[in-house]
Amino acid sequence: EAVYLSALAKAYAAGASVRDELVAFATKRINDPSLSATERGDVAAALVAAGAYDVALPLLANLARSQRGNWFWAYVEAAEKAKRGEELAAFLKAELARPDLSRKEREDRIYALIDHGGAVAALPYLRSQAETYGGEWVFAYEEAAKKAGQENQFLDFLVKWLEQPDLPRAERREGAFRLLAANRKPQAEKVFFSLARDQPPESPEVQQLLYLWGPRPTPAQLDWLEKRARDARGAEKGA
């Protein structure tokens, strides 16, 4: 039967009028309980080639869910070929709700959702990745939020994310400059203040903070500067 299916598929690809026969035979073969996952994949491939997507896509979706790996990409490719964008996006969202995905599998599904569902659909998953892993995922979330016209949502996330005490200084500094670029000066100033708190007066963090305060610091800011000066003099005397 596998040989006959292969022959039908080759004949169809060569232009023979065997589509109906191919679909009927492959559909019947799908229901054979003795078929392995690989054999079912061969049947699905023949159906996709024949344009019988209504039969092929559910089969490939089941294989993608149960076998994962290359079957996931086979389903994505077939759904794309069939122009079933909404169906594919729904499948990807269901996949992203699974608790058993590896980090790589989750990332693959997020990127596929961005491609086939758009930035808005991917935002919740990008935010989750940014919260968990930081780094490049913060950039990815920012880019998608801008494309979706939801930059303020990203900036609100960024303000909260920068409050993490164990976040590397470089990432906090970079985030503060992002807030400045987005006209979120008060929030940026708060981050720079936390960075400058334990730094020497000549440090980039203190200098940036002084720049933000301008030529006329508030009384509270003057008090902080005076305390820093006293502490610095005390440290010099103790040396």
Image: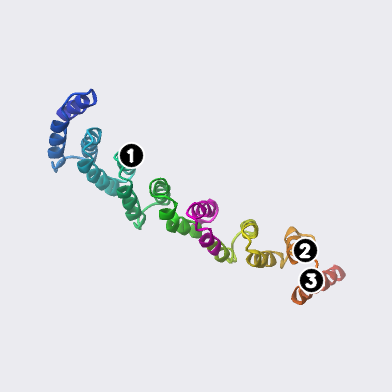
On the question of residue 1 being in view, the answer is: no
Q: Disc 2 marks which residue?
A: 200
**Magenta span dominant secondary structure:** helix
Q: How far across and how far down the image is residue 206, in percent?
A: 75, 63
- Who comes first in sequence, dot 3 or dot 2? 2
Q: How far across and how far down the image is residue 92, in percent?
A: 34, 51
Q: Are the residues tagged 3 and 2 within 8 Å (C-beta)? A: no
- Who comes first in sequence, dot 1 or dot 3? 1
Label 3 and label 2: CA atoms lie apart by 11 Å
Along the horizontal axis of the image, is 19 left or right of 137?
left
Q: Nearer the viewer, mark 1 or mark 3?
A: 1
- Identify which residue, 56 or 95, lies in the foreground: 56
User: Could you tell me which secondary element the residue under label 3 belongs to?
Assistant: helix
Q: Residue at x 54, y 64 (%)?
A: 156
Q: Is 153 rendered above or below residue 73?
A: below
Structural crowding at the residue carrying mark 2, measured as other residues with C-alpha within 10 Å and reported as few (<14), some (14–19) or many (≥20): some
Q: Disc 1 marks which residue?
A: 77
- Identify which residue, 232 or 216, lies in the foreground: 216
Q: Nearer the viewer, mark 2 or mark 1?
A: 1
Q: Which residues are magenta?
A: 133-156
Q: Residue at x 59, y 61 (%)?
A: 167
- Who comes first in sequence, dot 2 or dot 1? 1
Label 2 and label 1: CA atoms lie apart by 56 Å
Q: Is residue 142 magenta?
A: yes
User: Could you tell me which secondary element the residue under label 1 belongs to?
Assistant: helix
Q: Where, by quadrant of the figure, is residue 194 drawn?
A: bottom right
Inspect the image, locate mark 2, and give the three-letter code of the amino acid beneath it: Pro
Q: Is residue 63 magenta?
A: no
On the question of residue 43 being in view, the answer is: yes
Q: How far across and how far down the image is residue 175, in percent?
A: 61, 58
Q: Disc 3 marks which residue?
A: 225
